[in-house]
Image: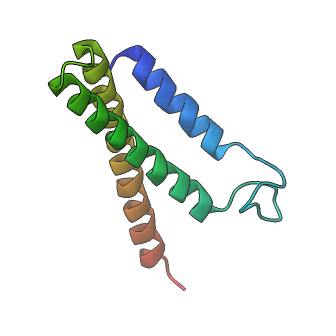
């Protein structure tokens, strides 16, 4: 189960990704990041969380990490993957709605 801190960090990361950044790389005329840039950053965040979880697990097996650190890293990865799956499901649902619209 994810702790409130892990969930708060996930929401804060999502807020940072979707906030307008002005002249940042990938910015469009509206001043915000392009959808592709936001999606790429989100996928990178999930991959980073997975790598951190793997590294903590390997460190624990060699006796260099605390069990709580491993549990926290795994919980963060779980929240990140769950968020990604929810976004994917919503994107598919939106695409299907668009395809059903009359021309």
Query: Residue at 39% across / 42% down in the picture?
Result: 83
User: In the rendered view, does 14 fall on the left or right side of 51?
Assistant: right
Q: How is the image coloured?
A: rainbow
Above or below residue 84? Residue 35 is below
The residue at the point 76 percent across, 60 percent down is: 27
Q: Is residue 96 above or below residue 50?
A: below
User: Residue at point 22% right, 15% down?
Assistant: 67
Residue at the bottom extreme? 103
Taking depth in this image into account, of 61 and 79 the one nearest to the observer is 61
Up the image or down, 9 lies above or below 87; here it is: above
Q: Is residue 25 rendered to the left or right of residue 85? A: right
Give the image location of residue 25, x and y in percent: 74, 59
Instruction: Using the image, determine if residue 92 lies above or below residue 66.
Output: below
Q: Residue at coordinates 44% horizontally, 16% vertically from top-left?
A: 5
Give residue 69's quadrant in the image.
top left
Q: Nearer the viewer, residue 45 or 5?
A: 45
Give the x, y percent position of residue 41.
54, 52
Is residue 72 left or right of 60 when viewed as pictured? right
């Amino acid at each position: 189960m994810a702790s409130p801190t892990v969930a708060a960090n996930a929401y804060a990361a999502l807020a940072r990704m979707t906030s307008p950044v002005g002249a940042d790389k990938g910015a469009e005329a509206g001043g915000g990041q392009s959808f592709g840039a936001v999606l790429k950053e989100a996928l990178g965040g999930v991959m980073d969380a997975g790598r951190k979880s793997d590294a903590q697990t390997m460190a624990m097996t060699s006796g260099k990490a605390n069990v709580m650190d491993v549990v926290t890293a795994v919980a963060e990865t779980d929240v990140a993957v769950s968020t990604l799956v929810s976004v994917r499901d919503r994107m598919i649902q939106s695409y299907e709605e668009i395809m059903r619209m009359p021309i």
